[in-house]
Image: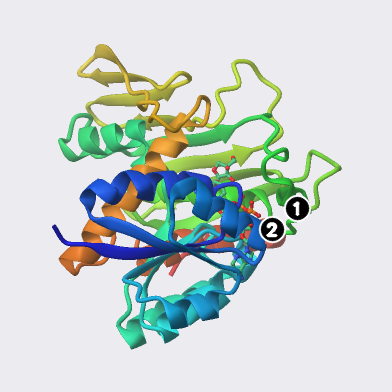
Amino acid sequence: MERTSLAVIGCGFFAQNHLNSWKDLAAKGVDVVAVCDIDPTKARAAAQKFGVPHWYSDAETMFRERRLDLVDIVTQVATHQALVELAIQHRVAAIVQKPFGLDIAACRAMAEAAHKAQVFLAVHENFRFQTPMRRIIELLQRGTIGEPNWARISFRTGYDIYKGQPYLMKEVRFALMDLGVHVMDLARVFMGEVAHLSAELQRRNPKVRGEDTVTTLLKHRNGGVSIVECTYEARRMPDAFPETRIELEGPRGAILLKPGSVLEVTVDCKMTTENADAPVLHWAERPWHIIQESVHATCAHILDALRSGRPASVSADDNVKTFGLCEAAYAAASSRRAVEID
Ligand code: NAD
Ligand code: 89Y
């Protein structure tokens, strides 16, 4: 079996899902040979918990000392560009968590540097790999409702995300970068590329620094329209965190993803209901299981792409397009005008 030597950089809150996923992917030939965190306590703890032979508190040293096929960067966004550049410099294929970079210029620079050096670079954009999203993609590809021409993609919660991710309170660019990248990515996947968009941003919680509520209106190149929105300030029951609600309408019917991952598919006036919930992996727990299973699926997809010598569907180039929609949404909100997407 082909073997892939992998290192994980960043051993904080979300990296635990990556480390569990890569451990499961040992069955597919993944060897996690090193972990790295500038906080040595976290690096050592991760190495112990996941049986990783080497741990580092400095990424440069790790790149020099270990022979790596792939590095998975799971640090906060401010460090992404420097760590991606380091991987490229050492000619090691890399995955970087969302949001790809601090702004579109940084994302483009990383994508271009990877091209120039011919180094594989993917972004860990996992929402399109969630079980219900994979099912929706399958239904659309089969033409079940025809080409969708209207959609609402909505992530609305009041769940206390600040407990696990306290840094989010201080982000100047907050909800669009944290959740907007996910829902915009789903809009592209379901409805195709975007021609123009308008946006409104709100800061409804005075304790956070950036916008916590995003409402956007997208016109797609095929003529379709979508409302793409996300908030951390919805006070509604049921609060289906971390589920995304989807409504898609096409000429033959509609696909609705409802709380509890209930999928309602209407074709030619006949509606069927299916359970599209993700399995709870052996290391996962509700309500995070949907996201946790999508991390595993994203890692598996990127690994396959790397090994087969093709870009991941969530390649750096692809994510530049998703990120570009978020950047356009900031521009649209501040200018109060619709922004053309080039
Ligand atoms: P975190 O702060 O808990 O963990 C980041 C870790 O990186 C910390 O332990 C920190 O010490 C370490 N670190 C920082 N700079 C480093 C460097 N130069 N070298 C090595 N280690 C370094 O943050 P988190 O919540 O785990 O988030 C990490 C990333 O994951 C963010 O980009 C976040 O947006 C993303 N995330 C994605 C999802 C998703 O569903 N895709 C969900 C949550 C978080
Ligand atoms: O940070 C967010 C993300 O990217 O997915 C879920 C999350 O952890 C909290 O909403």
In the image, residue 257 sits, relative to residue 123, either above or below, namely above
Look at mark 1 in the image and give the residue it sits on: 210
Q: Position of residue 269 (x, y in %)?
A: 24, 14
Colour mode?
Answer: rainbow
Q: Nearer the viewer, residue 53 or 339?
A: 53
Q: Position of residue 311 (x, y in %)?
A: 26, 66
* Residue type of the residue flagged with mark 2: Arg
Q: Residue at position x 34%, y 52% from top?
A: 299
Q: Earlier in the sequence, mark 2 or mark 1?
A: 2
Q: Residue furthest right?
A: 206
Please tell me in which quadrant of the rendered image residue 20 appears. Answer: top left
Image quarter where ligand 2 lies? top right
Q: Is residue 106 visible?
A: no
Disc 2 is placed on an element classified as loop
User: On the picture, is 61 further left or further right than 211?
Assistant: left
Work out how far the residue at label 2 is from the one at label 1, CA to CA, in angstroms.
5 Å
Disc 1 is placed on an element classified as loop
Look at mark 2 in the image and give the residue it sits on: 173
